[in-house]
Image (cartoon, rainbow, N blue to C red):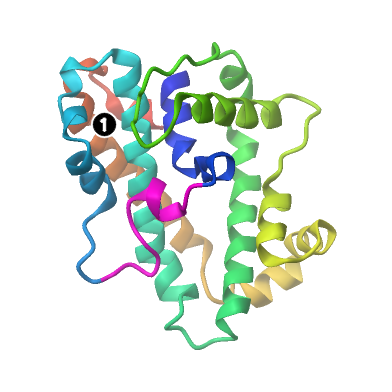
Amino acid sequence: MGAFFVGNTAPDVQVISGQTRTATHFFAVPIPEDAEVPWEKMLSTYPHILLSGELDETQAVFISGYLCHLQADWIWVKEIFEPIFGPRQNWSTFSQRIYWHNILRAYLDVEVLKVLPVEGILEIDPIEPQNWLPLISDQDLETWWKYIREQLTPGKHIKTFEVFAARQGTNVGEFQAMLESEEGMQKNIFSHITLQQLEDYRNQVVEKNTKILKQFLGPRIASDPEAVIQ
């Protein structure tokens, strides 16, 4: 579970490593018409990881988490970001749509944290990566895991607001105040996207991530992979 959790968050390691998002996610935004789906591009870039049955079990589970993240982000950009907040839309300005998009992402982080099995995550042993994925150094992965784990420790502060506020060039208080305003959220976000659309997105991710687990891990996983991804 530790390796999967680290892998499932690791594409965002650019916060630590200084890499570009495209380098860790294998696709650009906006998505070019001829873009290869990122999880397949990752496997074609590093073909040795296709041989999951020959990988160390921990490395294989880490990579499966990484692939699931890439798929979830790809679906988000295709189904949510581009058709609702992207540069081709015409409500408000693009910079304002980016702002509301980041508010929405922070809102979803808050919602996820309500059900995240934090105690179980904190019980995970320190990871010891050994060139799990060539594009990310072992040191950066270890630092990333400490960065995430520290925030989940009881009494510590989640840095989601700081990260998004910094991207928008605004202060944390203003960002959080907007997030906590039901009227502001309804007017600026939920008038353009419904909670049902977000639920549909989640269900699609669960379904397709489950297929990735089945295809990539194969006989390594239990007979009920849906339970694993849930």
* Residue appearing at x 84%, y 58% in the figure: 173
Q: Is residue 39 left or right of residue 173?
A: left
Q: Is residue 29 above or below residue 107?
A: below
* Residue appearing at x 47%, y 58% in the figure: 198
Residue 196, position in %: x, y? Answer: 47, 61
- Can residue 72 be seen here? The reply is no
User: Residue beneath label 1, please?
Assistant: 213
Magenta residues (range): 19-32
What amino acid type should be assigned to the residue bearing mark 1?
Answer: Leu
Q: Is residue 20 above or below residue 77?
A: above
Mark 1 closeness class: few <14, some 14–19, many ≥20 residues within 10 Å: many
> Quarter of the image holding residue 112?
top right
**Count of numbered marks:** 1
Residue 221, position in %: x, y? Answer: 26, 18
Q: Is residue 112 above or below residue 182?
A: above
* Residue appearing at x 54%, y 11% in the figure: 125
Q: Is residue 41 above or below residue 99?
A: above
Nearer to us in this view, 160 or 111: 160
Nearer to us in this view, 30 or 80: 30
Q: Is residue 23 left or right of residue 19?
A: left
Q: Is residue 161 one of those drawn in magenta? A: no
- Can residue 73 be seen here? The reply is yes
* Residue appearing at x 41%, y 26% in the figure: 4
Q: Quarter of the image containing the N terminus?
A: top left
Q: Quarter of the image containing the C terminus?
A: top left
Residue 194, position in %: x, y? Answer: 51, 67
Q: Secondary structure at mark 1?
A: helix
Q: Is residue 147 left or right of residue 218?
A: right
Nearer to us in this view, 205 or 71: 71
Residue 148, position in %: x, y? Answer: 61, 31
Q: Main secondary structure of the magenta part?
A: loop
